[in-house]
């Protein structure tokens, strides 16, 4: 396979030989106490309102094994196990539930899918595994946030979520806190499988290190995420807030195979300084009466570039399929760029497909109005941007939504003046 | 019989023109379009380069054929071509419209694709329209006929509109037989300050005729350019439209209607480049696909950093009339300036059932109601054509297809 070149991003060639493909999650703490952590990071934690104990874990401070969050974690796990829900790391799943892993792994994203999926399939060492049995509604938001041991699963992560008939699960990935990871390249693969009438809600908040103000360093985030609405009446919802990474390249997609299946995609991507994002979704309608909605909001600041790239394909078999896409871009500053590349392929005459997009900047009179009422220009812009992204942020689970609001304000800091 | 590459290679070797040599180098630099390339993925055009063709077969057209083609059209000047060669006896040139005489001009623009290069080097003739400053508006009609088994025709039109002058040009491309014919056509338009140019291109081609044309326009300050294309019939018709704005306040209106039926395959690729501030581009492309017809629209808008206060719209609406027809739509925006207002919209669907029902309750048959709605849909685009006789002729041709 050759390295793909179609994305609207610029990056130096990656030396695949210099990457370490397996890193044992280290038990050794990076810091002895919070005082040693960089004050800049702590300040961000405080702005986001993250509790002190969690701050320690996130920053990599040595944590006593009996602190609250760990016991909470085990408590949750017991409760889930009683309901038959499996939620564990991938290595445990491969050991304990080999049949399920064998049946579903690679069934949505085969190793031949793309360059990075092949790389991930070849070298992935761990990740998350979720299995929801029939007729079970998962009572809480499952999150990698609780699974402390999974934070350092490395750069080639694999997630597999299976929702059996009539089940429901909401899964959160990532967290709002800035992750100072040393790894340059992240190539994860996420596979979702929803059977009859099952619903999977997958939310991502990504705030990895975006590089410094001169555009040096930062993480390359090349992720393949795909869901399969396998059963009739199944539903997959993607929500993502992307503020981090130097280069983001991800297209959470859904294959709507079951009849009457539904998929929705909500995304906010904020790029600042020299960040580049080429992100969007693919909705492949195969089943009858399938519906999809795409709402994508791109905000570019500084010298960044933000692209939406999406595909809506209505196959011949997809009678009465319906799609609505809306992609809005906001440009703040004269050095940034916003692009929209939608692909619409319709092969069925009963389908209705709509796409609309706008690109504009914040109107001066809006800012003037806020200034007049005593808001600083920076606060006014944060307010307007939050309003712009509200439609998407509201789809996030509550506590995440609160943090995401603050996160967007923080990502924009220092860029307006 | 020879391939296009050997044909144009021969031409550029014979002429001692550096321009031809430069164009040939450009031609060689472009890769042969394959389905793996994003802009050529819907149709395999390999055989345009690998197969053997007869170039410029002898003339055969008659006065009757010409009369039938231009029957109801009004015009001030008429230029007739056959297989890319100028037809002296049938044409009615005037002071502004004639055929290209000197082979290569000083300011040939850079090619945008391999086909355009080939036609710029290989074409023996084409329309040369040179509108002097402050010339009053005229309507020039270009009629190009094509025939000959396994023939390959090259043609280039060159249009230069001086400051403060206006022109309307309509080009009809007609193939007279059902033999396999390839047509490679390029049009370069240059609009100077405060000028306007309206270019309408209509294709009536046979079921085995394939055409690829490139219409590129360079716009100076306060110029207005309107480019419309209406493929009525043909096996494969691809129109590439490039509009490049190099000075402020230049506006472009780009329209098109494609109606692929049976095995037809129509593509329109539009690229509007804004390099100067305060320009506008408005695109309206609509399509109806039936039987196993394939329609492709790809529109790209590029707004450079300097092009502040740009205002653009891009609209693509499609209707599918059968289960086997296909529509591919790709409206794209690439924006590097912040003080702009750019919107685009694309819809693909079918005829509104409620509107049909409404008309049926008022005693109109379902069939008649469908026709009426489709006619209305077509009129949206056709109404942009300013010459009444051309407008009516296109409307009539599209209605026949319904």
Image: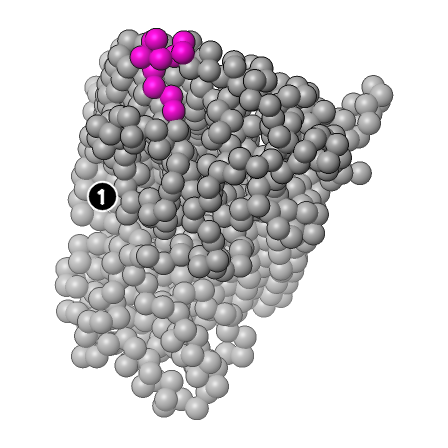
Figure check: B272 above or below A39: below
Q: Position of residue B262 (x, y in %)?
A: 17, 44
Mark 1 secondary-structure assignment:
loop
Residue at position x 53%, y 35% from top? A27
The chain holding disc 1 is B
Figure check: B74 above or below B15: above
Q: Position of residue A304 (x, y in %)?
A: 62, 46
Q: In this view, does B214 lie to the left or right of B48?
A: right
Q: Which residues, given as a range, are shown in magenta?
A: A78-88
Q: Where is residue B115 in the image (x, y as percent from the top left)?
A: 36, 67
Figure check: A17 above or below A311: below
User: B244 or B382, which lies in front?
Assistant: B244
Residue at position x 34%, y 29% from top? A92
Q: Where is residue B299 in the image (x, y as percent from the top left)?
A: 44, 47
User: B255 or A385, which lies in front?
Assistant: A385
Q: Is residue B238 left or right of residue A393?
A: left
Quadrant of residue B183 in the image?
bottom left
Residue at position x 62%, y 38% from top? A30
Quadrant in the picture for the N terminus of chain A: bottom left
The residue that disc 1 covers is B293
Quadrant in the picture for the C terminus of chain A: top right
Q: In this view, does B105 lie to the left or right of B193?
A: left
Q: Is residue B91 magenta?
A: no
Q: Can residue B223 be seen in this view?
A: no
Quadrant of residue A87 in the image?
top left
Quadrant of residue B187 in the image?
bottom left
Circle 1 Cα neighbour tier, 10 Å, few/some/many (<14 / 14–19 / ≥20)? many
User: B300 or B229, which lies in front?
Assistant: B300
Q: In this view, does B196 lie to the left or right of B278?
A: left
Residue at position x 34%, y 19% from top? A86
Figure check: B105 above or below A381: below
Q: Can residue A39 be seen in this view?
A: yes
């Amino acid at each position: 396979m050759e390295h793909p070149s179609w994305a609207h991003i610029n990056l130096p060639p990656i030396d695949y030989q210099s990457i370490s493909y397996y890193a044992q999650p280290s038990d050794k703490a990076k810091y002895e106490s919070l005082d040693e952590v960089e004050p800049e990071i702590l300040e961000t934690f405080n702005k986001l309102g993250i509790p002190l104990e969690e701050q320690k874990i996130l920053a990599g401070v040595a944590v006593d094994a009996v602190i609250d969050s760990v016991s909470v974690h085990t408590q949750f796990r017991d409760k889930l196990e009683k309901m038959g829900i499996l939620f564990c790391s991938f290595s445990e799943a491969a050991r304990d539930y080999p049949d399920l892993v064998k049946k579903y792994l690679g069934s949505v994203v085969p190793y031949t899918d793309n360059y990075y999926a092949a790389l991930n399939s070849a070298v992935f060492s761990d990740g998350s595994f979720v299995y929801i049995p029939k007729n079970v509604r998962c009572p809480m938001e499952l999150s990698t946030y609780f699974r402390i041991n999974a934070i350092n699963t490395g750069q080639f992560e694999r997630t597999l979520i299976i929702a059996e008939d009539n089940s429901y699960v909401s899964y959160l990935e990532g967290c709002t806190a800035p992750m100072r990871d040393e790894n340059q390249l992240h190539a994860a693969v996420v596979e979702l499988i929803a059977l009859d009438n099952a619903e999977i809600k997958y939310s991502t908040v990504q705030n990895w290190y975006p590089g410094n103000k001169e555009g040096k360093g930062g993480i390359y985030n090349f992720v393949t995420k795909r869901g399969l609405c396998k059963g009739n009446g199944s539903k997959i919802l993607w929500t993502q807030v992307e503020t981090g990474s130097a280069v983001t390249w991800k297209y959470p997609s859904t294959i709507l195979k079951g009849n009457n299946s539904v998929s929705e995609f909500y995304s906010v991507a904020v790029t600042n300084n020299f960040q580049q994002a080429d992100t969007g979704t693919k909705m492949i309608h195969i089943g009858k009466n399938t519906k999809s909605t795409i709402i994508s909001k791109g905000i570019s600041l500084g010298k960044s570039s933000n692209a939406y790239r999406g595909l809506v394909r209505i196959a011949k078999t997809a009678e009465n399929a319906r799609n609505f896409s809306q992609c809005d871009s906001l440009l703040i500053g004269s050095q940034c760029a916003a692009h929209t590349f939608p692909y619409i392929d319709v092969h069925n005459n009963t389908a209705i497909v709509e796409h609309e997009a706008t690109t504009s900047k914040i109107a001066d009179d809006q800012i003037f109005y806020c200034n007049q009422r005593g808001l600083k220009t920076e606060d006014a812009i944060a307010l307007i941007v939050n309003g712009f992204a509200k439609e998407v942020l509201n789809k996030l689970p509550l506590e995440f939504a609160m943090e995401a609001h603050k996160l967007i304000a923080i990502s924009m800091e220092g860029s307006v003046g | 019989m020879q391939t296009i590459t050997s044909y144009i290679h021969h031409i550029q070797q014979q002429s001692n023109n550096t321009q031809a040599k430069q164009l040939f180098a450009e031609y060689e630099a472009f890769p042969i379009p394959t389905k793996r390339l994003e802009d050529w993925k819907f149709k395999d055009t390999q055989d345009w380069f690998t197969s053997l063709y007869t170039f410029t077969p002898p003339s055969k057209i008659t006065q009757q054929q010409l009369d039938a083609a231009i029957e109801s059209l009004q015009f001030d000047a008429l230029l007739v071509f056959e297989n890319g060669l100028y037809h002296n006896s049938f044409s009615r040139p005037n002071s502004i419209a004639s055929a290209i005489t000197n082979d290569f001009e000083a300011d040939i623009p850079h090619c945008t694709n391999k086909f355009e290069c080939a036609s710029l080097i290989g074409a023996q003739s084409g329309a040369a329209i040179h509108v002097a400053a402050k010339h009053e508006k005229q309507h020039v009609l270009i009629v190009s006929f094509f025939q000959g088994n396994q023939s390959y025709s090259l043609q280039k039109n060159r249009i230069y509109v001086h400051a403060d002058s206006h022109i309307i040009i309509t080009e009809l491309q007609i193939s007279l037989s059902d033999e396999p014919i390839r047509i490679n056509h390029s049009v370069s338009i240059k609009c100077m300050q405060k000028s306007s140019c309206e270019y309408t291109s209509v294709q009536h081609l046979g079921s085995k005729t394939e055409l690829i044309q490139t219409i590129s326009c360079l716009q100076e300050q306060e110029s207005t350019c309107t480019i419309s294309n209406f493929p009525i019939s043909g096996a494969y018709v691809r129109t590439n439209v490039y509009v490049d704005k190099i000075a402020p306040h230049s506006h472009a209106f780009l329209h098109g209607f494609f109606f692929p039926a049976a095995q037809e395959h129509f593509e329109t690729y539009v690229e509007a480049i804004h390099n100067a501030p305060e320009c506008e581009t408005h695109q309206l492309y609509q399509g109806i696909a039936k039987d196993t017809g394939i329609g492709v629209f790809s529109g790209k808008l590029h707004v450079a950093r300097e092009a502040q206060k740009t205002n653009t719209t891009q609209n693509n609406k499609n209707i599918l009339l059968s289960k086997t027809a296909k529509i591919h739509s790709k409206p794209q925006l690439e924006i590097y300036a912040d003080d702009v207002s750019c919107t685009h919209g694309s819809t693909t669907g079918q005829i509104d059932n409620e509107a049909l029902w409404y008309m049926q309750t008022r005693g109109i048959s379902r069939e008649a109601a469908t026709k009426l709605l489709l006619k209305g849909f077509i009129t949206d685009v056709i109404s942009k054509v300013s010459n009444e006789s051309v407008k009516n002729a296109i409307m009539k041709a599209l209605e026949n297809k319904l």
